[in-house]
Amino acid sequence: MKKIKNFINKLLGFLFVSVICFAPTEGYLLAKYLFEPNGFWANLFLAGLAIYIGGPIQFLLFILWLALTFYFWSPKYNYQSNRSRRLY
């Protein structure tokens, strides 16, 4: 039972970090869906704006995502609630 809880906690943590870290990409896709750019210049403007504003932020968040993913899925990380810890 402890292994299942540990796996679910790792999975939920991974999903939460993934949604937060890829927010600039999700914002770009939402803007592209809402604005519905027609033609080359509209698409180029939207892509250039996304690269200029969201590019550096997305790069830093991707590095954070890699670090947190390795942390969550490393064998050393095991979630334990305060009730299950034993103090010796």
Image (cartoon, rainbow, N blue to C red):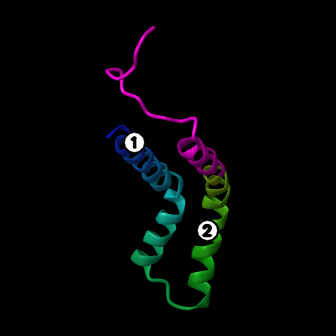
The image's mark for residue 49 is: 2
Q: Is residue 70 magenta?
A: yes
C-alpha separation, residue under disc 1 versus residue under disc 2:
45 Å
Residue at horizontal 36 percent and vertical 37 percent from the top: 2
Viewport quadrant of the N terminus: top left
Q: Nearer the viewer, residue 4 or 53?
A: 4
Residue at horizontal 53 percent and vertical 36 percent from the top: 77
Label 2: few (<14), some (14–19) or many (≥20) C-alpha neighbours in 10 Å = few
- Magenta highlight range: 63-88
Q: Is residue 48 left or right of residue 27?
A: right
* Residue identified by numbered label 1: 3
- Residue 55 pos. (x, y %): 65, 60
The image's mark for residue 28 is: none
84 in relation to 72, above or below: above
Per the image, label 1 sits on a secondary structure element best described as helix
Residue at horizontal 67 percent and vertical 63 percent from the top: 52
Viewport quadrant of the C terminus: top left
35 in relation to 60, above or below: below
Task: Please identify the residue farthest to the bottom as the structure is shown.
Answer: 39
Disc number lying in front (1 or 2): 1
Residue at horizontal 48 percent and vertical 72 percent from the top: 29
- Residue 73 pos. (x, y %): 55, 46
Earlier residue among tags 1 and 2: 1
Per the image, label 2 sits on a secondary structure element best described as helix
